[in-house]
Image (cartoon, coloured by chain):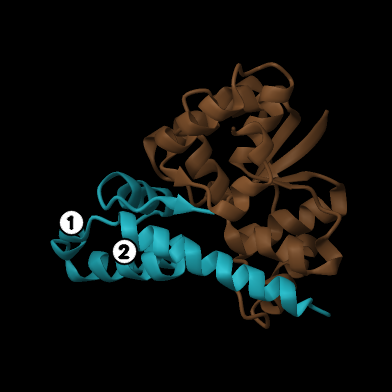
Chain colours: A cyan, B brown
Amino acid sequence: MRVDADKIREWVEYFREAREIRRRYANWDFIRSQPLNVRIALEYYIETGDFRTAARIAGMGVDEFVDMAKDLAGIPSVG
Amino acid sequence: MVNAIADTSFLIDWIRYSKSKLIFKLFNVIYIPENVLNEIKSERALIWVSEGLEEGGLAIFPELPEISREALDLVVRSRRVPVRPVDYPEAFCLVVGRRLNFTVLTENGGAIALKNYDPEYFGVEVLRGIDIIYRLWRLNHLNSFKDELELYQRETKHIYSRKDLVKYSDYLK
């Protein structure tokens, strides 16, 4: 597959901006109060946006994890 | 009307929107792959999907081996590029979109990026919540694009980035 390097740079910046938004909105008090696996899952989700792996780390269903991240941990989905 | 196929990231956000059922005005049938259905566990999502199946707006898309193989290849390929890769469920939807000319509904950044950088997928129509709201507004199912997008972002707790909003800047003033 031939990939346009300029496009890739644009997407790298796009995902960086999304990460900054998740960090800014996150309820860090809630996150720090969670059991270890849930805390690590939420932090992983903030850094990567990868809700599927984060849900596995937390031991939750994918939609249950995203709902918890949005409604309790304050982390929006971005992008 | 065309058919669409929706992935988990789209469904999780879209069903939180109070006017979510309007989407059925845009598509003949919205397919949900078996692998996406398996990821849905919350009461809200299960009720939305089961009602859609009852009313005929939704249908289940089976796990076809040929599409599965191609989706797995796409997952591997996307990991060679230094941006967020696609996971199997999103790859499955993209392959169905390309092969059957279905619109792909997703909010997954990896899938949206891949459609933009992978020449094989340039032709696939990929829509997000913001695009659906825009189309509903253009067809007079919604009164205001700007107000509705604000409502959508508030209800779904989904934030669109500057890059996403630029495309619609003329309609958001």
Give neighbour class at mark 2: few <14, some 14-19, many 20+ (Cα, 10 Å).
many
Indicate the amino acid at tag 2.
Leu
What x and y, as percent, mark residue A15?
53, 67
Residue A57's image quarter?
bottom left
Task: Tell which subunit mark 1 falls on.
Answer: A
Q: Residue at (61%, 50%) from the top-left corner?
A: B164
User: Relative to B81, does residue A74 appear above or below in the rendering?
Assistant: above
Name the chain under label 2: A
The residue sitting at 57% across, 70% down in the picture is A13
Q: Which image quadrant: the C terminus of chain A?
A: bottom right
Residue A62 at what x, y percent from top left?
Answer: 43, 54
Q: Residue furthest bottom?
A: B80
The vertical placement of B1 against A44, above or below, is: above
| Viewer-proximal residue among B158 and A67 | B158
Q: Where residue B9 sits in the image (x, y, percent)?
A: 53, 50
Residue A30: image tag: 1
Identified by mark 1, the residue type is: Phe
In the image, residue B122 sits, relative to residue B30, either above or below, namely below
User: N-terminal of the two: label 1 or label 2?
Assistant: 1
Identify the residue under disc 2.
A42
Taking depth in this image into account, of B143 and B16 the one nearest to the observer is B143
